[in-house]
Image (cartoon, grey):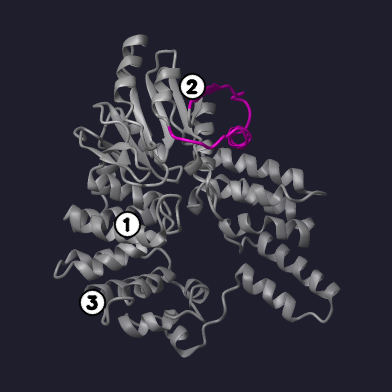
């Protein structure tokens, strides 16, 4: 996302090893595109929030910050981290006319406003005029279904509270919300809840749930992410609905519109693999196909590439969440299927691995993860092991070389001389920790969990500022 022209300042990374300082804008965008505000291996959620706030001050360009947040929310589907940024802008930016438009455009769903206000009121007592006016604009965009779906009953700040704070122009949908006459949204949750409430026996509950799933799927009243999360329930509660559900699952238009991050499919696959019986194999096959569709924008790059995945301890740790190595393995598999590429993993040392590119991205990724060993993070080993000339080397890692390790610059120079090559380095940061391992001139620093990062990758070698240029085009 940024051509790293001048980053030669050595520093200590979070693992205690040597690294190169990342420019504040690069670090900020990496955080926006990789952070779900959960504890990571090297940083807690609270530390991440503090770092975001500090970076906004360090960058000193609130319009860039605002554009980056809108980009992350509307293009990459990132939610909680953009709520933090919006709350910080409300606190830090005073008197700028563009902020009204920002607080309108950062709202992708009604509950975005509730989350931003909840964050903001943790430290502030009164909302700002731009925040109120921007949310007032956003509120009138939503129809009855959206308002009902995200009314937030039981939350500290409900949607009616947002309306009372912002005083938007009246619409029929908003009037119904405030009068309490808005009909409940027929979401999958509400339909299944009604099935349970309206039954008098376990047999009748099963019948009503089966009927509810059939209606939701046939009438396409279930969102794509909800479908992905409920495949197990559909298999168990409405097996006759499964063929239609799997048709929706592999619908290219639905996948592209959903903003579902590719690694979410891996979570679904792990859940379905716990089952056996009718429909399981077909569901796994459909999930594998959906993954390949979701990653269909992987660029075809000229020449020969080396794809490298960090399989060290910090990459294989996910806590209760999916581990960074699983995300990296999926992206690496997608690159291997499309491009003339060799593949290597590294931790304490590095090793080549080969795969059949005709296999699905899911199958390749799973095999990679199964062989992950944990251990240290020695970037030197990549260039000591690489034995062929490459046009580019694409490294998926959290970029946390360990204590005692210098940066791999000298070994990279030796590799280039040995192979008579001068490859581009793609430094793909999977955790947004804020440091780099490569200060060389032809280095592209990338970040993000969305397949849309591959659209940027297509442009980088021709336009080193591709992602920053895209952010600059976001209107405020």
Chain part drawn in magenta: 349-377
Q: Residue drawn at (32%, 43%), measured in percent from left and top?
A: 13
Q: Residues within 10 Å of mark 3 (few under 14, many from 20)?
A: some
The quadrant in which residue 239 appears is bottom right
Q: Position of residue 140 (x, y in %)?
A: 37, 74
Question: Is 368 within the magenta?
Answer: yes
Q: Are marks 1 and 3 in contact (CB under 8 Å)?
A: no
Label at residue 341: 2
Label at residue 128: 3
Q: CA distance from mark 1 to mark 3?
A: 19 Å
Taking the view exactly as shown, the residue that stands out farthest to the front is 404
The quadrant in which residue 48 appears is bottom left
Choose the circle earlier in sequence order: 1 or 2. Answer: 1
Q: Residue drawn at (41%, 56%), measured in percent from left and top?
A: 78
Q: Residue drawn at (62%, 60%), measured in percent from left and top?
A: 220
**Along the line of sight, the residue nearer the viewer: 349 or 150:** 349
Query: Helix, strand or loop at disc 2?
Result: strand
Question: Is 449 within the magenta?
Answer: no
Choose the circle earlier in sequence order: 2 or 3. Answer: 3
Label at residue 70: 1
Q: Residues within 10 Å of mark 2 (few under 14, many from 20)?
A: many
* Nearer to us: label 1 or label 2: 2
Q: CA distance from mark 2 to mark 3?
A: 52 Å
Q: Position of residue 394 (x, y in %)?
A: 41, 29
């Amino acid at each position: 996302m940024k051509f790293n022209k001048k980053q030669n300042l050595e520093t200590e990374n979070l693992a205690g090893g040597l690294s190169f300082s990342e420019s504040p804008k690069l670090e900020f965008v990496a955080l926006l595109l990789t952070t779900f505000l959960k504890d990571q291996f090297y940083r807690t959620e609270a530390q991440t929030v503090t770092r975001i706030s500090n970076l906004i001050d360090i960058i000193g360009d609130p319009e860039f910050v605002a554009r980056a947040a809108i980009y992350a929310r509307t293009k990459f589907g990132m939610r909680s981290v953009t709520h933090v940024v919006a709350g910080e802008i409300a606190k830090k930016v005073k008197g700028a006319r563009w902020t009204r438009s920002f607080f309108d455009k950062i709202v992708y769903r009604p509950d975005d406003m509730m989350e931003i206000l909840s964050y903001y009121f943790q430290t502030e007592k009164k909302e700002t005029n731009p925040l109120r006016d921007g949310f007032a604009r956003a509120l009138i965009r939503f129809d009855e279904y959206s308002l009902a779906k995200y009314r937030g009953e039981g939350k500290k700040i409900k949607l009616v509270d947002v309306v009372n704070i912002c005083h938007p122009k009246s619409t029929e949908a908003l009037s119904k919300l405030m009068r309490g006459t808005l009909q409940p949204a027929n979401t999958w949750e509400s339909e299944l809840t009604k099935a349970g409430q309206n039954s008098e026996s376990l047999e009748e509950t099963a019948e009503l749930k089966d009927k509810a799933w059939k209606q939701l799927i046939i009438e396409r009243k279930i969102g794509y992410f909800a479908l992905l999360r409920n495949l197990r329930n559909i298999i168990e509660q409405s097996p006759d609905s499964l063929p239609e559900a799997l048709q929706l699952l592999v619908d290219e238009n639905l996948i592209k519109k959903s903003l579902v991050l590719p690694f979410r499919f891996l979570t679904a696959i792990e859940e379905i693999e716990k089952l056996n019986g009718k429909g399981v194999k077909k569901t796994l096959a459909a999930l594998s196909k959906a993954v390949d569709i979701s990653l269909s924008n992987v660029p075809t790059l000229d020449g020969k590439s080396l794809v490298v995945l960090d399989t060290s301890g910090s990459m294989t740790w996910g806590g209760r969440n999916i581990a960074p190595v699983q995300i990296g393995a999926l992206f690496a598999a997608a690159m291997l299927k499309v491009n003339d590429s060799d593949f290597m993993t590294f931790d304490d040392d590095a090793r080549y691995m080969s795969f059949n590119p005709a296999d699905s991205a899911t199958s390749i990724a799973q095999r990679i993860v199964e062989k992950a060993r944990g251990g240290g993070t020695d970037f030197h080993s990549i260039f000591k092991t690489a034995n062929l000339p490459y046009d580019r080397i694409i490294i998926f890692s959290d970029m946390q070389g360990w204590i005692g390790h210098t940066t791999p610059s000298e070994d990279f120079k030796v590799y280039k001389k040995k192979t008579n090559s001068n490859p581009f380095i793609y430094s793909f940061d999977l955790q947004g920790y804020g440091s780099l391992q490569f200060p060389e001139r032809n280095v592209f620093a990338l970040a993000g969990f969305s397949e849309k990062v591959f659209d940027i990758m297509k442009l980088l070698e021709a336009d080193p500022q591709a992602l920053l240029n895209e952010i600059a085009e976001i209107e405020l």
